[in-house]
Amino acid sequence: MKISTISEDLFREAVEIIPGGVNSPVRAFKSVGLPPRFITSGAGCRIYDEDGNVFIDYVGSWGPLILGHAHPEVVESLKATLKKGTSFGAPTRGEVELARIITEMVPSIEMVRLVNSGTEATMSAIRLARGYTGRDRIIKFSGCYHGHSDSLLARAGSGAATFAVPDSMGVPGSVVEQTLVFHYNDLEAVRTQIQENPNRLAAIIVEPVAGNMGVVPPKAGFLQGLRDLCSRDGALLIFDEVMTGFRVAPGGAQELYNVKPDLTCLGKIIGGGLPAAAFGGPKHIMEYLAPVGGVYQAGTLSGNPLAVAAGLTTLRILQRDNPYNDLESKTARLAKGIKEVFINNGVPHTINRVGSMLSVFFHPGPVNCYEQALLADKESFRRFFGRMLDQGVYLAPSPFEAWFVCTAHSHEDIDMTLEAMRKSFKKEC
Ligand code: HOZ
């Protein structure tokens, strides 16, 4: 007889009162055929579940926790802020300080508006681009995920890909009619579209490093090519740096690849583990936003003091400690080690990595777009995921997501992860 775990009991209860038992689809372990673990706490790079299991965590709350769980300075800043009240619906000093540090770190941002989630950031950036250009049409790329607003749920990645709903029900055809979708890294197709339909496009929105179809880096010239096409056509280039912002370099992918978008969407790290996000760009565009201009955008909890405190502390630590070389070397070592284990076990694979984001595809590759990511063997991923979990390594429960390495992962943790992987393969033989 199988004895159920506390996580399983909680999940059974949850599915009765929460759709799918989870408050965001990616959290369900449905595609890997397991019940999700209910987490009680986290410290550094480790998380603990209701059953007393401990895991080395490579999800990091899906990207925000670049400093790991419960970083002492972030916790202290939250405690200090909490004592003074949680929300005022009025401006606070922290918002100005956070806006300042964002403009210092991200090269293209002169002005920034704080929101609560990546979805809000991308949705608002699209509205702003449409208001600024007076055009409706947008271009996105299949497998890129820009949150769950209507006009961006077209061939979307992340959970939408994992659960095979890339074109969600409930989205009016008339809304996505204005969203053209191209293959990631296919610059020529975008060029042809714009050449044949000039002056129609409001914006191209792109993840400058895709992280929601698994990690897919931009090919050389792809981002600069999009930049040039937008500049010539009078359309705006929007970088969705919700994942890559403050992650692949202090100034995000735009710093790493030296390409300047018109608008940038930020999320995840900017809130240090609390709900904060932002979009920003040059003043002459941002001042189209209300109350200065006619593009409306608002939020009761936008710039929430607690989220601002956690984000500000996180960004200050990143500025002070500049951990990017260290993250790079640890993640490179992890990727190299994974590759060795796969080779030793005869597993066809591709590992894509940019900085501290990586993905493993069970497919010889290459993986340069969503259509190639879809070729990866899902059954091999499912087995790999389960074995790693058994060995105490917590990965995103989908082949269409990134692994995130944080500053709290030590070289020893990387070694332990690789040892867990070796053991898991031995067990299977
Ligand atoms: N953007 C996150 C990673 N793909 C997913 C977060 C969520 O949907 O809950």
Image: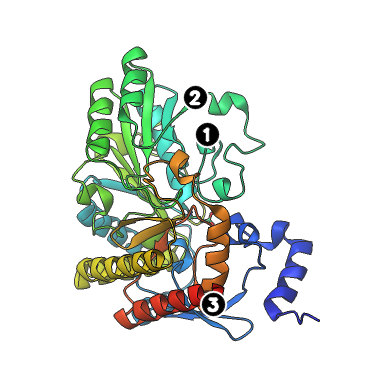
Relative to 80, 151 lies left or right: right
Q: Is mark 3 within 8 Å of ligand 1?
A: no
Q: State how far apart marks 3 and 1 are (Cα).
A: 46 Å
Quadrant location of residue 250? bottom left
Residue type, label 3: Lys
25 is higher (above) or lower (below) than 179: below
Q: Which mark is residue 151?
A: 1
The amino acid at mark 2 is Gln
Disc 3: which residue: 427
The residue tagged 2 is 178
Outermost residue toward the bottom?
A: 52
Q: What whole-number distance in Å separates the C-alpha atoms at marks 3 and 2?
A: 51 Å
Secondary structure under tag 3 reads helix
Question: Does the rendering let one see residue 205?
Answer: yes
Viewer-nearest of discs 3 and 2: 3
**Could you classify mark 2 by the number of other residues whose Cα lies within 10 Å: few (under 14), some (14-19), or many (20 or more)?**
some
Q: Is residue 328 left or right of residue 67?
A: left
Considering the numbered disc 1 on the image, is that residue within a helix, a strand or a loop? helix
**Label 1 or label 2, whichever comes before in sequence order:** 1
Residue at 35 percent of width and 60 percent of height: 357
What residue sits 23% from the left and 66% below the top?
324
Please say if the residues under marks 1 and 2 sit with CB atoms less than 8 Å apart: yes
